Amino acid sequence: MRLEVGEKRSTSVGVLGLVVLALFACKSQQEQPQAEQPVAAPQPDPQLNVEPPPEPAQPVAAALSFTLSHSSINQGESVKLTFSQAVNPASGKNWVTIVPAGKPDNDWGEWKYVPAGATSIELTPKATGSVEVRLHDTYPDHKFGVLHRASLSVVASKCNGTFASECDCPGGVKGAMTCDESRGWSACDCPKPKPKPKPLSCRDGQTRACPCGDGTFGRQTCDRGRWPSGCFLCD
């Protein structure tokens, strides 16, 4: 009877040990770090794989133009051109002219260069009737290219032969236009430039050295603003 009880106890202890070992193995397995799962590479978003929008177009500089102070003037009067922006060409010079309507672009009448930075300029047409005011591209780069044009009516005025109006002359000076009923307007009468006096080559009594031909030097004396042809005081 004692032997049976001992055998039962041994069996119970053995089973209990197996249970403890099983629990310990399970816990150890849970505590072991899990192997890292490979991370999938990010897939491109089809909505993001789009061509970038085009760059906005740069604003184009407005073309140079002008407006006229009057659509009709009397003969001898001036018309004012007001530009759409200050005239600042990269090179060369813009110029304006007035010609009878219908003339080709390579024709010109009264004309002026437009100063750099100018916002307006005046012209006095000589032709009467329908004329055209033209703003030309820069010279000499573009020859006769016309940037802008406008029509103008010039009404012929009656005059009695007295001073009528100023007109432009070369060099920036002013002249006068006169007319009578039978002959009409005259050409611009420009003042004649005064001749410049010739500079004297020397002052009277002034002396200078001159070669004598034998290696020595003599003297010349200025007489009435000129040097003599000979050399004096030579041996």
Image (cartoon, rainbow, N blue to C red):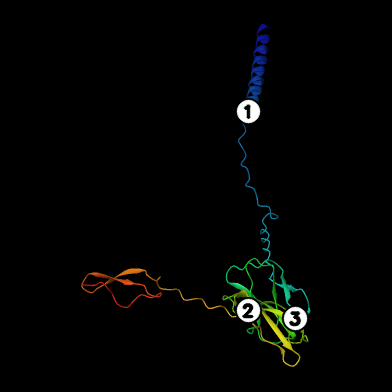
Q: Quadrant of residue 225?
A: bottom left
- Name the residue carrying label 3: 151
Q: On the image, numbered disc 1 is attached to which residue?
A: 29
**The quarter of the displayed image where residue 87 is located:** bottom right
Report how far apart the C-alphas of labels 2 and 1 lie in the structure.
112 Å
In-image side of 224 versus 162 (left or right): left
- Amino acid of disc 3: Ser
Q: Is residue 126 visible?
A: no
> Which mark identifies residue 169?
2
Image position, residue 199 (x, y; %): 45, 73
Q: Amino acid at mark 2?
A: Cys
Residue 51 percent location from the top left of the image: 66, 59
Whole-percent x and y of residue 219?
Answer: 29, 70
Query: In which quadrant will I find the C terminus?
Result: bottom left
Q: Position of residue 174 (x, y in %)?
A: 65, 76
- Quadrant into which the N terminus falls: top right
